[in-house]
Image (cartoon, rainbow, N blue to C red):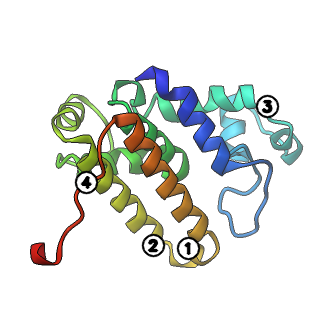
Amino acid sequence: MQKNFNAALAHVLLFEGAYSDHPLDPGGATNLGITQAVLASYRGQPVSKDDVRALTKKEAAAIYKKNYWEPACCGSLPSGVDFAVFDCAVNQGVGRAARFLQQAANVAADGKIGPATLAAVARTPAGALLGEFMARRMLSYGLLQKLFKTFGLGWSRRLMATHVAALALSGAAPAKAAQPSDI
């Protein structure tokens, strides 16, 4: 649903923050979550770290819509799922977001959200879908062992906040946790 773009963007900006150039962050110079490489690609010309530092929220919003919301088909996803997929696309890449969604919806994970994925998502209860989607995100974070030591707690906080907000937007209750008798 297109109506959730502004809420999803506000959420992403809470976690992406202001300008940074952390030596362990593979994105390098970043402002409002937009890397130097993404800004250069969007503008169609090389940009400096000062250009990244001067990035406005308005331009960042346009980049997020064009490079993440639209390629991840967020406008075609149910409320809450759109929010979660957008956050993942920004933080972990559009292709990963699509594959995690497809795996959660139990369809072939080709990294392209199309009619089969959208139909499977529509058939899957939102609470269960979001729970599985978030579990796949967390597993992916955990596999980044060298980076997890530095960024893992922040990623975990982001993931939990995204899950709570996505569930609220979807109107779904969290998926039932496995009980010892289920194992």
- Residue 159's place in the image compared with 65, above or below, is below
Quickly name the residue at label 3.
56
Kind of residue at badge 3: Thr
Distance between the alpha carbons at the discs numbered 3 and 4: 38 Å
Q: How many labels does the image show?
A: 4
Quickly name the residue at label 2.
142
- Residue 105's place in the image compared with 136, above or below, is above
Question: Which mark identifies residue 34?
Answer: none
Instruction: Pinpoint residue 144: horizontal percent, then vertical percent.
Output: 50, 72
Distance between the alpha carbons at the discs numbered 2 and 1: 6 Å
Instruction: Pinpoint residue 83: horizontal percent, then vertical percent.
Output: 45, 37
Distance between the alpha carbons at the discs numbered 3 and 2: 32 Å
Residue farthest along the left direction in this orientation:
181
Kind of residue at badge 4: Ala
| Left or right relative to 145: residue 28 | right
Quickly name the residue at label 4.
175
